[in-house]
Image (cartoon, grey):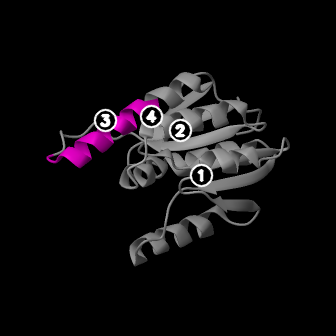
Amino acid sequence: MTGSLPPLTLVIGGARSGKSAFAESLVLGSGRARRYVATAEARDNEMRDRIARHRRERGDGWMTVEAPLQLPEALAQVGRDEVVLLDCATLWLTNHLLADHDLVAETGKLIAALTTCVAPVVIVSNETGWGIVPENALARRFRDEQGRLNQRLAAEAGLVVTVIAGLPMVLKGALP
């Protein structure tokens, strides 16, 4: 897949759907210098292993920036000749939710940073609304906030792709 990306691309899907691999293929196809903005925090051994596996699977040639909370600041550092893979909005939202931050304000800052970023951004996010209604208030709040965030991202994106079982389906825009 080669071609130019719109200023913002949203790749959305469920857990283990293939969304990150597809997003990486979009970034690789751009031919630009690659910047990976990671939102995961290695709080336990299982997460450390996941992060290490993602790094191995991505391979060399990526500049990695860890930004579990400060995405606007990380996006402000991007150069015009780069392309950004931001993986993932779901963990970023989780980090802010658990820190009891103002999610409306933080989302507003993120959207502003995405729309003013000088390079194309491909953002990965989870679709969490297809399951049953969670049994506890925190899980319900997270599901609702994730749905709102995804709607905001999709509204701003020029390209929105959902990935199911490794298969991409364009919801908005056209693949490069």
Q: CA distance from mark 3 to mark 1?
A: 22 Å
Q: Quadrant of the N terminus?
A: top right
Q: Was residue 46 drawn as part of the magenta stretch in this picture?
A: no
Q: Which residue is mark 4?
A: 104
**Which element is circle 1 on?**
loop
The mark total stands at 4
Magenta region, mostly helix, strand or loop? helix
For label 4, the crowd category at 10 Å Cα-Cα, with few meaning under 14, some 14 to 19 and many 20 or more, is few
Q: Position of residue 175 (x, y in %)?
A: 64, 29
For label 1, the crowd category at 10 Å Cα-Cα, with few meaning under 14, some 14 to 19 and many 20 or more, is some
User: CB of mark 1 within 8 Å of CB of mark 2?
Assistant: no
Q: Which residue is mark 2?
A: 11
Eye-nearest disc, 1 or 2: 1
Q: CA distance from mark 4 to mark 1?
A: 15 Å
- Magenta residues, as a range? 135-150
Find residue 144 and name its label. 3
Q: CA distance from mark 4 to mark 3?
A: 12 Å
Q: Position of residue 74 (x, y in %)?
A: 68, 51
**Residue occupying the point 24% across, 48% down:** 138
Sequence-wise, the earlier of marks 2 and 3 is 2
